[in-house]
Amino acid sequence: MEGFQVKGGEKLKGQVRLQGAKNAVLPILAAALLPEEGETVIRDCPEIRDADAMTGILGKLGCVCSRRGAELRLNNRGLRHWEMPDELSKQIRSSIFLLGPILGRMRRATVTYPGGCEIGLRPIDLHLKGLRALGVRILEEGGVIHCEGGGMRSGPVYFDYPSVGATENVMMAAALLPGLTTIHNAAREPEIEDLQGFINAMGGCVRGAGTQVIEVEGVKKLRGVSYAPIPDRIVGGTLLCAAAVTGGEIILANACPRHMIPVSEKLKEMGCRILQETDRLILKAPDRLKAFSQLQTQPHPGFPTDMQAQMLAASCLAEGTSVIVENVFENRLSHVADLCRMGADIRVSGRTAVVRGVKALTGARVTARDLRGGAALVIAALAAQGESVVGHIALVDRGYAHLEDALNALGACVRRVKTDTIDPSE
Ligand code: EPU
Protein backbone atom coordinates (compact mmCIF):
# COMPACT_ATOMS: atom_id res chain seq x y z
CA MET A 1 0.00 0.00 0.00
CA GLU A 2 1.07 3.55 -0.66
CA GLY A 3 0.97 6.55 1.64
CA PHE A 4 2.10 10.16 1.78
CA GLN A 5 4.96 11.07 4.06
CA VAL A 6 4.41 14.73 4.92
CA LYS A 7 6.81 17.12 6.66
CA GLY A 8 4.53 19.69 8.23
CA GLY A 9 5.02 23.40 8.75
CA GLU A 10 5.73 24.75 5.24
CA LYS A 11 3.56 27.69 4.14
CA LEU A 12 2.06 26.96 0.73
CA LYS A 13 2.96 29.65 -1.80
CA GLY A 14 2.68 29.93 -5.55
CA GLN A 15 0.39 29.17 -8.45
CA VAL A 16 -1.27 25.93 -9.47
CA ARG A 17 -3.40 24.92 -12.46
CA LEU A 18 -6.53 22.91 -11.63
CA GLN A 19 -7.25 19.52 -13.19
CA GLY A 20 -10.52 18.75 -15.00
CA ALA A 21 -13.30 17.94 -12.53
CA LYS A 22 -13.76 14.28 -11.54
CA ASN A 23 -17.49 14.67 -11.00
CA ALA A 24 -17.91 16.32 -14.38
CA VAL A 25 -15.72 13.92 -16.32
CA LEU A 26 -17.31 10.70 -15.00
CA PRO A 27 -20.82 11.45 -16.36
CA ILE A 28 -19.24 12.92 -19.51
CA LEU A 29 -17.42 9.61 -20.10
CA ALA A 30 -20.73 7.80 -19.61
CA ALA A 31 -22.45 10.15 -22.07
CA ALA A 32 -19.68 9.50 -24.58
CA LEU A 33 -21.49 6.18 -25.22
CA LEU A 34 -24.39 8.09 -26.81
CA PRO A 35 -23.03 9.05 -30.26
CA GLU A 36 -23.14 6.39 -32.96
CA GLU A 37 -20.71 8.23 -35.18
CA GLY A 38 -17.40 10.00 -34.82
CA GLU A 39 -14.69 9.98 -32.23
CA THR A 40 -15.05 11.77 -28.90
CA VAL A 41 -11.99 13.52 -27.49
CA ILE A 42 -11.96 14.50 -23.83
CA ARG A 43 -9.28 17.10 -23.20
CA ASP A 44 -8.03 17.76 -19.68
CA CYS A 45 -9.25 14.37 -18.51
CA PRO A 46 -7.71 14.03 -15.01
CA GLU A 47 -5.36 11.10 -14.38
CA ILE A 48 -7.34 9.69 -11.49
CA ARG A 49 -8.29 6.14 -10.56
CA ASP A 50 -12.05 6.69 -10.96
CA ALA A 51 -11.59 7.84 -14.56
CA ASP A 52 -9.46 4.74 -15.25
CA ALA A 53 -12.15 2.50 -13.74
CA MET A 54 -14.80 4.20 -15.89
CA THR A 55 -12.81 3.80 -19.12
CA GLY A 56 -12.20 0.16 -18.08
CA ILE A 57 -15.98 -0.37 -18.05
CA LEU A 58 -16.45 1.48 -21.35
CA GLY A 59 -13.78 -0.77 -22.89
CA LYS A 60 -15.61 -3.93 -21.75
CA LEU A 61 -18.78 -2.59 -23.37
CA GLY A 62 -16.94 -2.35 -26.69
CA CYS A 63 -15.95 1.32 -26.72
CA VAL A 64 -12.30 1.79 -27.73
CA CYS A 65 -10.55 4.19 -25.31
CA SER A 66 -6.98 5.44 -25.63
CA ARG A 67 -5.22 7.97 -23.44
CA ARG A 68 -2.25 10.23 -24.21
CA GLY A 69 -1.52 12.30 -21.14
CA ALA A 70 -4.58 14.34 -20.36
CA GLU A 71 -6.27 13.56 -23.69
CA LEU A 72 -8.67 10.64 -23.91
CA ARG A 73 -10.05 9.38 -27.23
CA LEU A 74 -13.19 7.26 -27.37
CA ASN A 75 -14.76 5.47 -30.30
CA ASN A 76 -18.09 3.64 -30.03
CA ARG A 77 -18.18 1.85 -33.32
CA GLY A 78 -17.66 -1.49 -31.59
CA LEU A 79 -20.21 -0.88 -28.83
CA ARG A 80 -22.24 -4.05 -28.53
CA HIS A 81 -22.57 -5.05 -24.86
CA TRP A 82 -25.23 -3.82 -22.48
CA GLU A 83 -24.11 -5.81 -19.41
CA MET A 84 -21.72 -3.94 -17.17
CA PRO A 85 -18.79 -6.02 -15.89
CA ASP A 86 -19.37 -7.03 -12.29
CA GLU A 87 -15.93 -6.43 -10.77
CA LEU A 88 -15.24 -3.06 -12.39
CA SER A 89 -18.76 -1.79 -11.69
CA LYS A 90 -18.32 -2.51 -8.00
CA GLN A 91 -15.16 -0.35 -7.96
CA ILE A 92 -17.00 2.86 -8.76
CA ARG A 93 -20.53 3.75 -7.86
CA SER A 94 -20.68 6.05 -10.87
CA SER A 95 -21.19 2.92 -12.98
CA ILE A 96 -24.87 3.28 -12.03
CA PHE A 97 -25.29 6.27 -14.30
CA LEU A 98 -24.12 4.23 -17.28
CA LEU A 99 -27.64 2.76 -17.21
CA GLY A 100 -29.02 5.93 -18.84
CA PRO A 101 -26.72 6.08 -21.88
CA ILE A 102 -26.70 2.28 -22.41
CA LEU A 103 -30.50 2.27 -22.37
CA GLY A 104 -30.53 5.29 -24.65
CA ARG A 105 -28.40 3.48 -27.21
CA MET A 106 -29.43 -0.17 -26.84
CA ARG A 107 -32.78 -0.12 -25.03
CA ARG A 108 -31.57 -2.59 -22.44
CA ALA A 109 -28.92 -2.64 -19.69
CA THR A 110 -27.78 -4.83 -16.83
CA VAL A 111 -25.77 -3.79 -13.79
CA THR A 112 -24.87 -5.32 -10.44
CA TYR A 113 -26.42 -3.52 -7.49
CA PRO A 114 -23.66 -1.12 -6.38
CA GLY A 115 -24.39 -1.38 -2.63
CA GLY A 116 -23.09 1.03 0.00
CA CYS A 117 -19.63 2.57 0.28
CA GLU A 118 -17.33 4.21 2.82
CA ILE A 119 -19.46 7.35 3.16
CA GLY A 120 -22.94 5.90 3.39
CA LEU A 121 -25.63 3.48 2.23
CA ARG A 122 -26.10 5.30 -1.07
CA PRO A 123 -29.32 3.74 -2.33
CA ILE A 124 -30.24 4.00 -6.03
CA ASP A 125 -34.02 4.28 -5.68
CA LEU A 126 -34.07 7.75 -7.31
CA HIS A 127 -32.12 6.50 -10.34
CA LEU A 128 -34.58 3.63 -10.81
CA LYS A 129 -37.61 5.87 -10.20
CA GLY A 130 -36.37 8.28 -12.87
CA LEU A 131 -35.82 5.51 -15.41
CA ARG A 132 -39.22 3.93 -14.63
CA ALA A 133 -40.84 7.31 -15.30
CA LEU A 134 -39.35 7.03 -18.82
CA GLY A 135 -41.04 3.66 -19.32
CA VAL A 136 -38.07 1.41 -18.46
CA ARG A 137 -39.12 -1.95 -16.97
CA ILE A 138 -36.78 -2.88 -14.14
CA LEU A 139 -36.31 -6.29 -12.60
CA GLU A 140 -34.10 -6.61 -9.52
CA GLU A 141 -32.94 -10.18 -9.06
CA GLY A 142 -30.20 -11.54 -6.79
CA GLY A 143 -28.33 -8.22 -6.62
CA VAL A 144 -28.54 -7.71 -10.39
CA ILE A 145 -30.64 -4.99 -12.01
CA HIS A 146 -32.07 -5.83 -15.45
CA CYS A 147 -33.48 -2.87 -17.37
CA GLU A 148 -35.67 -3.36 -20.41
CA GLY A 149 -36.27 -0.21 -22.42
CA GLY A 150 -38.39 -1.44 -25.36
CA GLY A 151 -41.27 0.78 -24.18
CA MET A 152 -39.20 3.88 -23.38
CA ARG A 153 -40.93 7.23 -23.87
CA SER A 154 -40.22 10.82 -22.90
CA GLY A 155 -42.30 12.61 -20.24
CA PRO A 156 -42.15 14.25 -16.83
CA VAL A 157 -39.79 12.98 -14.12
CA TYR A 158 -40.05 14.22 -10.54
CA PHE A 159 -37.31 13.68 -7.95
CA ASP A 160 -38.11 13.73 -4.22
CA TYR A 161 -34.51 14.83 -3.64
CA PRO A 162 -32.17 16.57 -6.12
CA SER A 163 -29.78 13.64 -6.59
CA VAL A 164 -26.78 14.51 -8.78
CA GLY A 165 -26.33 11.05 -10.27
CA ALA A 166 -30.05 10.37 -10.82
CA THR A 167 -30.46 13.72 -12.61
CA GLU A 168 -27.50 12.87 -14.87
CA ASN A 169 -28.83 9.36 -15.52
CA VAL A 170 -32.19 10.66 -16.73
CA MET A 171 -30.59 13.43 -18.85
CA MET A 172 -28.55 10.78 -20.68
CA ALA A 173 -31.41 8.28 -21.01
CA ALA A 174 -33.62 11.02 -22.52
CA ALA A 175 -31.06 12.55 -24.92
CA LEU A 176 -32.01 10.17 -27.77
CA LEU A 177 -35.66 9.63 -26.79
CA PRO A 178 -38.23 11.26 -29.11
CA GLY A 179 -40.24 14.07 -27.45
CA LEU A 180 -39.77 16.25 -24.37
CA THR A 181 -38.55 14.97 -20.98
CA THR A 182 -38.87 17.43 -18.10
CA ILE A 183 -36.91 16.75 -14.91
CA HIS A 184 -38.44 18.46 -11.88
CA ASN A 185 -36.45 19.08 -8.68
CA ALA A 186 -33.26 18.38 -10.61
CA ALA A 187 -29.83 18.73 -8.99
CA ARG A 188 -28.23 22.12 -9.76
CA GLU A 189 -24.52 21.32 -9.39
CA PRO A 190 -22.08 22.91 -11.91
CA GLU A 191 -21.27 19.38 -13.13
CA ILE A 192 -24.89 19.04 -14.35
CA GLU A 193 -24.44 22.21 -16.42
CA ASP A 194 -21.26 20.69 -17.83
CA LEU A 195 -23.07 17.50 -18.82
CA GLN A 196 -25.70 19.63 -20.58
CA GLY A 197 -22.86 21.45 -22.38
CA PHE A 198 -21.36 18.14 -23.51
CA ILE A 199 -24.65 16.64 -24.73
CA ASN A 200 -25.46 19.83 -26.63
CA ALA A 201 -21.96 19.96 -28.15
CA MET A 202 -22.69 16.46 -29.52
CA GLY A 203 -25.84 17.81 -31.19
CA GLY A 204 -28.33 17.25 -28.35
CA CYS A 205 -30.99 19.59 -27.05
CA VAL A 206 -30.93 20.08 -23.27
CA ARG A 207 -31.79 23.30 -21.42
CA GLY A 208 -32.31 24.47 -17.86
CA ALA A 209 -29.27 22.79 -16.21
CA GLY A 210 -28.28 24.83 -13.16
CA THR A 211 -31.98 25.36 -12.32
CA GLN A 212 -34.48 22.96 -10.71
CA VAL A 213 -36.19 22.17 -14.01
CA ILE A 214 -34.27 20.58 -16.88
CA GLU A 215 -35.81 19.97 -20.29
CA VAL A 216 -34.41 17.38 -22.68
CA GLU A 217 -35.72 17.25 -26.22
CA GLY A 218 -34.66 13.95 -27.72
CA VAL A 219 -32.72 14.08 -30.98
CA LYS A 220 -32.31 11.30 -33.54
CA LYS A 221 -28.53 11.14 -33.46
CA LEU A 222 -25.52 12.51 -31.62
CA ARG A 223 -21.99 12.77 -32.98
CA GLY A 224 -18.58 12.60 -31.29
CA VAL A 225 -16.92 15.93 -30.35
CA SER A 226 -13.88 17.36 -28.63
CA TYR A 227 -14.70 18.67 -25.14
CA ALA A 228 -12.94 19.75 -21.93
CA PRO A 229 -14.67 19.40 -18.53
CA ILE A 230 -14.89 22.29 -16.06
CA PRO A 231 -12.00 22.77 -13.61
CA ASP A 232 -12.31 20.77 -10.40
CA ARG A 233 -13.88 23.03 -7.76
CA ILE A 234 -13.25 20.42 -5.03
CA VAL A 235 -9.53 20.04 -5.83
CA GLY A 236 -9.43 23.86 -5.89
CA GLY A 237 -11.16 24.06 -2.50
CA THR A 238 -8.80 21.43 -1.07
CA LEU A 239 -5.74 23.45 -2.13
CA LEU A 240 -7.28 26.63 -0.72
CA CYS A 241 -7.81 24.91 2.66
CA ALA A 242 -4.22 23.65 2.61
CA ALA A 243 -2.94 27.18 1.91
CA ALA A 244 -5.28 28.68 4.53
CA VAL A 245 -4.23 26.37 7.34
CA THR A 246 -0.50 26.79 6.65
CA GLY A 247 -0.75 30.61 6.58
CA GLY A 248 0.10 30.63 2.87
CA GLU A 249 -0.76 32.56 -0.25
CA ILE A 250 -1.76 30.79 -3.47
CA ILE A 251 -3.22 31.44 -6.88
CA LEU A 252 -5.54 28.94 -8.53
CA ALA A 253 -5.13 29.37 -12.28
CA ASN A 254 -7.93 28.28 -14.65
CA ALA A 255 -10.39 28.13 -11.75
CA CYS A 256 -14.07 28.98 -12.03
CA PRO A 257 -14.55 31.26 -8.96
CA ARG A 258 -18.37 31.24 -9.47
CA HIS A 259 -18.40 27.49 -8.71
CA MET A 260 -16.39 27.99 -5.53
CA ILE A 261 -18.47 30.68 -3.79
CA PRO A 262 -19.70 28.54 -0.83
CA VAL A 263 -16.09 27.55 -0.03
CA SER A 264 -14.48 30.94 -0.61
CA GLU A 265 -17.16 32.65 1.52
CA LYS A 266 -16.41 30.27 4.44
CA LEU A 267 -12.69 30.89 4.07
CA LYS A 268 -13.36 34.65 4.17
CA GLU A 269 -15.31 34.08 7.41
CA MET A 270 -12.13 32.41 8.70
CA GLY A 271 -10.10 35.54 8.00
CA CYS A 272 -8.64 34.76 4.55
CA ARG A 273 -8.44 37.46 1.91
CA ILE A 274 -9.79 36.21 -1.40
CA LEU A 275 -9.61 37.89 -4.76
CA GLN A 276 -11.72 36.47 -7.57
CA GLU A 277 -10.93 37.20 -11.20
CA THR A 278 -12.60 35.72 -14.29
CA ASP A 279 -10.65 32.48 -14.22
CA ARG A 280 -8.31 32.90 -11.26
CA LEU A 281 -8.75 32.82 -7.53
CA ILE A 282 -6.15 34.24 -5.15
CA LEU A 283 -6.06 33.44 -1.42
CA LYS A 284 -3.97 35.07 1.28
CA ALA A 285 -4.26 33.50 4.70
CA PRO A 286 -4.00 35.27 8.06
CA ASP A 287 -1.41 34.18 10.65
CA ARG A 288 -4.13 32.23 12.44
CA LEU A 289 -7.55 31.26 11.08
CA LYS A 290 -10.76 32.17 12.94
CA ALA A 291 -13.49 29.60 13.63
CA PHE A 292 -16.73 29.83 11.61
CA SER A 293 -20.04 29.69 13.47
CA GLN A 294 -21.69 26.94 11.45
CA LEU A 295 -21.22 24.94 8.28
CA GLN A 296 -24.09 22.79 6.97
CA THR A 297 -23.59 20.62 3.89
CA GLN A 298 -26.40 20.84 1.34
CA PRO A 299 -27.07 20.25 -2.34
CA HIS A 300 -25.72 23.04 -4.60
CA PRO A 301 -25.74 26.03 -4.20
CA GLY A 302 -25.36 25.09 -0.52
CA PHE A 303 -22.02 24.11 0.98
CA PRO A 304 -20.69 20.98 -0.86
CA THR A 305 -20.41 17.77 1.15
CA ASP A 306 -17.22 17.02 -0.85
CA MET A 307 -15.50 19.95 0.95
CA GLN A 308 -16.74 19.20 4.48
CA ALA A 309 -13.77 17.08 5.57
CA GLN A 310 -11.17 19.57 4.28
CA MET A 311 -12.90 22.52 6.01
CA LEU A 312 -13.13 20.48 9.20
CA ALA A 313 -9.37 19.87 9.02
CA ALA A 314 -8.73 23.60 8.55
CA SER A 315 -11.01 24.48 11.48
CA CYS A 316 -8.95 22.26 13.85
CA LEU A 317 -6.34 25.04 14.07
CA ALA A 318 -8.74 28.01 13.95
CA GLU A 319 -9.26 30.24 16.97
CA GLY A 320 -12.64 29.49 18.57
CA THR A 321 -15.29 26.80 18.10
CA SER A 322 -16.66 25.70 14.70
CA VAL A 323 -19.78 23.56 14.24
CA ILE A 324 -20.15 21.32 11.19
CA VAL A 325 -23.30 19.42 10.21
CA GLU A 326 -23.11 16.77 7.47
CA ASN A 327 -26.60 16.55 5.96
CA VAL A 328 -25.96 14.78 2.64
CA PHE A 329 -24.26 11.49 3.60
CA GLU A 330 -24.80 9.54 6.80
CA ASN A 331 -21.22 8.38 7.40
CA ARG A 332 -18.89 11.15 6.32
CA LEU A 333 -17.03 12.04 9.50
CA SER A 334 -14.60 9.12 9.61
CA HIS A 335 -11.58 11.47 9.36
CA VAL A 336 -12.36 12.83 12.85
CA ALA A 337 -10.73 9.98 14.80
CA ASP A 338 -7.41 10.40 12.95
CA LEU A 339 -7.50 14.21 13.30
CA CYS A 340 -7.91 13.71 17.06
CA ARG A 341 -4.83 11.45 17.02
CA MET A 342 -2.97 14.48 15.63
CA GLY A 343 -4.12 16.56 18.61
CA ALA A 344 -7.40 18.04 17.33
CA ASP A 345 -10.25 18.63 19.78
CA ILE A 346 -13.43 17.39 18.06
CA ARG A 347 -16.68 16.03 19.54
CA VAL A 348 -19.09 14.19 17.27
CA SER A 349 -22.75 13.62 17.96
CA GLY A 350 -24.65 11.96 15.11
CA ARG A 351 -23.90 13.99 12.00
CA THR A 352 -22.64 17.06 13.91
CA ALA A 353 -18.99 17.75 14.72
CA VAL A 354 -18.00 20.46 17.21
CA VAL A 355 -14.39 21.54 16.66
CA ARG A 356 -12.53 23.53 19.31
CA GLY A 357 -9.50 25.04 17.64
CA VAL A 358 -6.13 24.08 19.10
CA LYS A 359 -2.86 26.01 18.75
CA ALA A 360 -0.94 23.14 17.13
CA LEU A 361 -1.34 19.67 15.66
CA THR A 362 1.34 17.00 15.92
CA GLY A 363 2.45 14.72 13.10
CA ALA A 364 1.17 11.14 13.36
CA ARG A 365 0.50 7.96 11.40
CA VAL A 366 -3.03 8.12 10.11
CA THR A 367 -5.08 6.32 7.46
CA ALA A 368 -7.38 7.62 4.72
CA ARG A 369 -10.85 6.03 5.07
CA ASP A 370 -12.45 7.74 2.08
CA LEU A 371 -11.43 10.12 -0.71
CA ARG A 372 -12.17 13.52 0.85
CA GLY A 373 -11.40 12.37 4.40
CA GLY A 374 -7.97 11.33 3.12
CA ALA A 375 -7.45 14.79 1.60
CA ALA A 376 -8.42 16.29 4.98
CA LEU A 377 -5.70 14.26 6.72
CA VAL A 378 -3.13 15.52 4.18
CA ILE A 379 -4.21 19.11 4.95
CA ALA A 380 -3.82 18.51 8.69
CA ALA A 381 -0.41 16.87 8.12
CA LEU A 382 0.78 19.90 6.12
CA ALA A 383 -0.01 22.15 9.08
CA ALA A 384 1.15 19.79 11.84
CA GLN A 385 4.45 20.00 13.68
CA GLY A 386 6.78 17.20 12.63
CA GLU A 387 6.25 14.35 10.23
CA SER A 388 3.08 12.42 9.38
CA VAL A 389 2.32 9.42 7.23
CA VAL A 390 -1.13 9.31 5.66
CA GLY A 391 -1.77 5.69 4.69
CA HIS A 392 -4.08 4.15 2.05
CA ILE A 393 -3.57 7.06 -0.29
CA ALA A 394 -5.07 4.99 -3.13
CA LEU A 395 -8.40 6.38 -1.94
CA VAL A 396 -7.13 9.93 -2.49
CA ASP A 397 -5.85 8.94 -5.97
CA ARG A 398 -9.48 8.20 -6.89
CA GLY A 399 -10.09 11.93 -7.28
CA TYR A 400 -6.79 13.84 -7.08
CA ALA A 401 -4.28 13.52 -9.93
CA HIS A 402 -0.79 13.34 -8.36
CA LEU A 403 -1.78 15.50 -5.38
CA GLU A 404 1.79 15.38 -4.04
CA ASP A 405 3.10 17.11 -7.20
CA ALA A 406 0.61 19.98 -6.90
CA LEU A 407 1.45 20.44 -3.19
CA ASN A 408 5.22 20.20 -3.70
CA ALA A 409 5.01 22.79 -6.49
CA LEU A 410 3.52 25.08 -3.83
CA GLY A 411 6.43 24.46 -1.47
CA ALA A 412 5.12 21.52 0.56
CA CYS A 413 7.23 18.51 1.41
CA VAL A 414 5.21 15.41 0.49
CA ARG A 415 6.64 12.07 -0.63
CA ARG A 416 4.78 9.03 -1.93
CA VAL A 417 6.05 6.01 -0.01
CA LYS A 418 5.28 2.32 0.38
CA THR A 419 3.71 2.27 3.83
CA ASP A 420 4.55 -1.37 4.52
CA THR A 421 8.28 -0.62 4.14
CA ILE A 422 8.43 2.30 6.56
CA ASP A 423 10.30 1.59 9.76
CA PRO A 424 7.78 2.20 12.56
CA SER A 425 10.61 3.40 14.85
CA GLU A 426 11.49 6.28 12.45
N1 EPU B 1 -29.59 9.11 -2.68
C1 EPU B 1 -30.68 8.30 -2.44
N2 EPU B 1 -31.19 7.59 -3.50
C2 EPU B 1 -30.66 7.68 -4.76
C3 EPU B 1 -29.56 8.52 -4.99
C4 EPU B 1 -29.04 9.24 -3.92
O1 EPU B 1 -31.16 8.20 -1.33
O2 EPU B 1 -31.17 7.00 -5.67
C5 EPU B 1 -29.01 9.86 -1.54
C6 EPU B 1 -27.55 9.46 -1.32
O3 EPU B 1 -27.43 8.28 -0.56
C7 EPU B 1 -26.99 10.69 -0.62
C8 EPU B 1 -27.77 11.83 -1.27
O4 EPU B 1 -28.94 11.24 -1.87
O5 EPU B 1 -27.28 10.61 0.74
C9 EPU B 1 -26.99 12.58 -2.34
O6 EPU B 1 -26.61 11.69 -3.37
P1 EPU B 1 -26.40 12.12 -4.90
O7 EPU B 1 -27.15 11.12 -5.75
O8 EPU B 1 -26.71 13.55 -5.08
O9 EPU B 1 -24.85 11.88 -5.07
P2 EPU B 1 -24.11 10.99 -6.15
O10 EPU B 1 -24.60 11.30 -7.51
O11 EPU B 1 -24.07 9.59 -5.72
C10 EPU B 1 -22.29 12.83 -6.56
C11 EPU B 1 -20.80 12.90 -6.49
C12 EPU B 1 -20.35 12.78 -5.05
C13 EPU B 1 -20.97 13.94 -4.26
C14 EPU B 1 -22.50 13.90 -4.40
C15 EPU B 1 -23.18 15.07 -3.74
C16 EPU B 1 -20.15 11.98 -8.61
C17 EPU B 1 -19.47 10.91 -9.36
N3 EPU B 1 -20.22 11.84 -7.30
O12 EPU B 1 -22.63 11.56 -6.00
O13 EPU B 1 -18.93 12.91 -5.05
O14 EPU B 1 -20.63 13.82 -2.91
O15 EPU B 1 -22.85 13.92 -5.81
O16 EPU B 1 -22.72 16.27 -4.23
O17 EPU B 1 -20.57 12.97 -9.20
C18 EPU B 1 -16.78 12.79 -4.13
O18 EPU B 1 -16.37 13.35 -5.16
O19 EPU B 1 -16.07 12.63 -3.11
C19 EPU B 1 -18.16 12.31 -4.09
C20 EPU B 1 -18.60 11.42 -3.20
Image (spheres, rainbow, N blue to C red):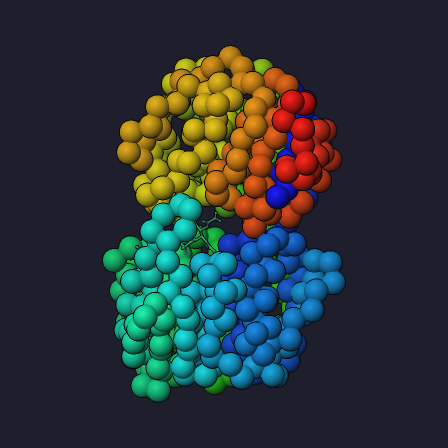
Question: Where's residue 425, x and y in %?
Answer: 65, 22
**Which quadrant holds residue 378?**
top right
In this rendering, would 198 be left or right of 296?
right
Q: Establish if 399 lies above or below 218.
A: above
Closer to the camera, 126 or 57? 57
**How many discs mark residues in the rendered view?**
0
Q: Quadrant of the N terminus?
A: top right
Closer to the camera, 57 or 135? 57
Q: Establish if 355 lies above or below 22.
A: above
Q: Which residue: 58% across, 33% down?
A: 390
Looking at the image, the residue that sits furthest to the top is 359
In this rendering, would 402 be left or right of 206?
right
Q: Which residue: 58% across, 15% down?
A: 287
Query: Is any atom of residue 160 visible in this view?
Result: yes
Q: Which residue: 55% across, 64% down?
A: 54
Question: Where's residue 103, x and y in %?
Answer: 42, 78
Q: Quadrant of the C terminus?
A: top right
Closer to the camera, 87 or 249? 87
Question: Where's residue 309, x and y in %?
Answer: 46, 35
Q: Establish if 64 lies above or below 411.
A: below
Q: Establish if 340 lies above or below 53.
A: above
Q: Which residue: 55% across, 69% down?
A: 57
Question: Where's residue 206, x and y in %?
Answer: 44, 70
Query: Is any atom of residue 270 visible in this view?
Result: no
